[in-house]
């Protein structure tokens, strides 16, 4: 017999299996010897009271052996002659490729950047020397943006697909099993590269192809039908379908689609800044204790409000993390956040962004469908120039930002390329600056202590999502006007994170299998 119950566990005992088993026997009114095993299937933290507690859901196995937390997928070598080109090796591309293999279809993965290990050298070039490689950076390369920018696995896209199946596959390829039970699962940028590499090996070992330094520079079309792609301006590759899983920063793909008269459309997105606090401060505010309990993780937060009919909200919060340069061009400055698995940095950072709508890019309407994208580039250029035309980030204490004053000094930061004091209240577009300033007062009342001179903002956080959508049929998931082309993931406008992108990749692979 198996029974499922919920327990409240003090942080002192969250890692003590005997205590959890004892509490289970008390709640079920059973003798301890009747319970063969207790398995935690969901774990979250409730910090509403003065002492945070863990709320856990457990399965009690009564006089029977426990079942594994996850089931491995047995991949079989591809035997058919059907093939699909997968452009991009982020989560959408990787999980689409794994699913294609289960359908006996060969994925040909084309990645413009380098493998996970080779990427490290280019990331060091950005961090230490401010040198941006447009083809290999925090956004481009094996695993996509998520590989070296945190690995948060929380998603609200559960209606679109099987979240647990995605997590199972990540565990199968080396992620810790904790991601199967944590309410806000996280792998960490120190562990994700090995997971991504293991997925690549599964794809290759079962008959798929994987090519690095392979940038798609054109499409091979016949009328309103895609036949294949051209790589690096010279090599032609043909297949039964093409999946576009290029991520939100591959702007050249949007221009390439437009050049080939393949329909794209503008969409709303969000932009703002990265905000950074000392992690002990956030811990004290969230956990109501001066020093965080050793069994409690670095605390996070989620804030949002409406200012002048626009959403202003925290985004991609990284407890115990660092701010990183996510630029993909030599004359722009883009910031993101990441955490390693231990989340042991003394800093907490988060995006703090404002919803961007069509009326905001009215000065760029001459660019047509690319107006929003050009506005995004404009803000990135502002940050780049304010930072001294380098990856140094313009920054300001949030109290000075709200009061319209230049900061005389700046707090310490996790951002390795460094910061420079800057009047962000003046140089950011007014529709962004005004709403951010007002939101900080609101958030300071919601979370007392959040509004403090110990916190600072750095510019600019612009890649929350793509300003372009590649339209597709809601049933077939094929492009609305071009056959055999399947827009997928964040870059196409259909996902917003690792898990949702992975789910979208699986759905697209299923749709292709249904057709071919």
Image: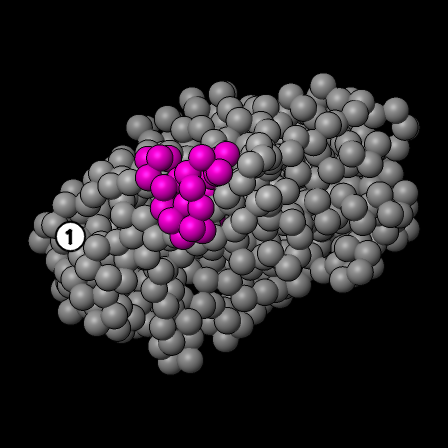
Picture residue at 50% right of the left edge, 31% below the top: 175
Please tell me in which quadrant of the rendered image residue 93 appears: top right
Q: Measuring 65% from the left and 49% from the top, which residue is drawn there? A: 162
Q: Nearer the viewer, residue 195 or 45?
A: 45
Q: Is residue 27 magenta?
A: yes
The image quarter containing residue 141 is top right
Taking the image as shown, residue 74 lies to the left or right of residue 249, namely right
Asked if one can make out residue 247 in the rendered structure from this viewpoint, the answer is no
What is the quadrant of the C terminus in the image? top right
Q: Nearer the viewer, residue 232 or 142?
A: 142
Quadrant of the rendering where the N terminus is positioned: top right
- What's the magenta region? 16-43
Image coords of residue 342 (percent x, y)? 33, 34
Could you tell whether 387 is left or right of 377 in the image?
left
Quarter-of-image position of residue 25 = top left
Secondary structure of the residue carrying tag 1 is loop
Q: Position of residue 21 (x, y in %)?
A: 40, 40
Can you say whether 31 is above or below 127 in the image? below
Residue on which the image places disc 1: 289
Q: Residue at x 90, y 28 (%)?
A: 80
How many neighbours does mark 1 have within 10 angstroms: few (below 14), some (14-19), or many (20 or more)?
some
User: For residue 424: magenta?
Assistant: no
State the residue at coordinates (80%, 49%): 511
Near-viewer residue (34 or 475):
34
Residue 393 pos. (x, y %): 28, 46
């Amino acid at each position: 017999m198996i029974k499922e119950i919920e327990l409240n566990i003090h942080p002192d005992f969250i890692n003590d299996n005997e205590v959890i088993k004892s509490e289970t026997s008390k709640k079920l009114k059973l003798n301890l010897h009747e319970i063969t095993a207790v398995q935690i299937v969901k774990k979250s933290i409730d910090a509403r009271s003065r002492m945070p507690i863990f709320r856990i859901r457990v399965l009690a196995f009564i006089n029977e052996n426990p079942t594994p937390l996850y089931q491995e997928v047995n991949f079989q070598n591809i035997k058919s002659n059907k093939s699909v080109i997968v452009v991009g090796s982020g989560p959408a591309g990787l999980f689409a490729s794994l699913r294609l293999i289960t359908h006996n279809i060969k994925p040909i993965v084309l990645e413009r950047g380098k493998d996970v290990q080779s990427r490290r050298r280019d990331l060091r070039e950005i961090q230490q020397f401010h040198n941006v490689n447009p083809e290999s950076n925090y956004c481009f390369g094996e695993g996509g943006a998520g590989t070296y920018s945190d690995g948060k696995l929380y998603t609200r896209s559960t209606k679109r697909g099987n979240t647990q199946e995605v997590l199972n596959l990540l565990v199968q390829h080396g992620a810790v099993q904790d991601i199967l039970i944590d309410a806000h699962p996280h792998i960490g940028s120190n562990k994700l590269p090995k997971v991504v590499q293991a997925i690549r090996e599964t794809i290759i070992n079962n008959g798929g192809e994987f090519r690095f330094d392979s940038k798609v520079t054109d499409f091979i079309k016949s009328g309103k039908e895609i036949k294949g792609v051209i790589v690096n301006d010279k090599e032609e590759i043909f297949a039964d379908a093409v999946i576009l899983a290029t991520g939100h920063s591959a702007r050249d793909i949007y221009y390439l689609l437009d050049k080939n008269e393949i329909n794209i459309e503008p969409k709303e997105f969000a932009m703002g800044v990265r905000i950074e606090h000392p992690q002990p401060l956030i811990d004290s505010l969230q956990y109501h204790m001066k020093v965080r309990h050793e069994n409690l993780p670095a605390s996070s937060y989620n804030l949002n409000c409406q200012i002048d009919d626009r959403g202003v909200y925290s985004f991609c919060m990284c407890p115990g993390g660092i701010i990183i340069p996510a630029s993909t061009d030599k004359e722009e400055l883009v910031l993101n956040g990441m955490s390693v698995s231990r989340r042991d940095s003394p800093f907490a950072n988060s995006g703090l962004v404002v919803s961007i709508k069509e009326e905001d890019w009215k000065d760029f309407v001459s660019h047509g469908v690319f107006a929003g994208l050009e506005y995004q580039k404009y803000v990135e250029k502002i940050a780049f120039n304010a930072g001294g035309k380098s990856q140094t980030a313009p920054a300001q204490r949030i109290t000075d930002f709200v009061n319209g004053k230049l900061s005389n000094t700046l707090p310490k930061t996790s951002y390795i390329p460094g910061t420079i004091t800057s009047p962000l209240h003046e140089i950011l577009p007014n529709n962004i600056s005004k709403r951010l300033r007002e939101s900080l007062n609101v958030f300071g009342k919601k979370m007392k202590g959040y509004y403090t001179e110990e916190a600072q903002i750095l510019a600019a956080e612009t890649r929350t999502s793509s300003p372009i959508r590649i339209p597709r049929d809601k049933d077939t998931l094929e492009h609305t006007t071009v056959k055999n082309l399947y827009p997928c993931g964040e870059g196409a406008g259909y996902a917003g994170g690792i898990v949702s992108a992975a789910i979208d990749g699986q759905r697209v692979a299923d749709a292709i299998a249904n057709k071919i």
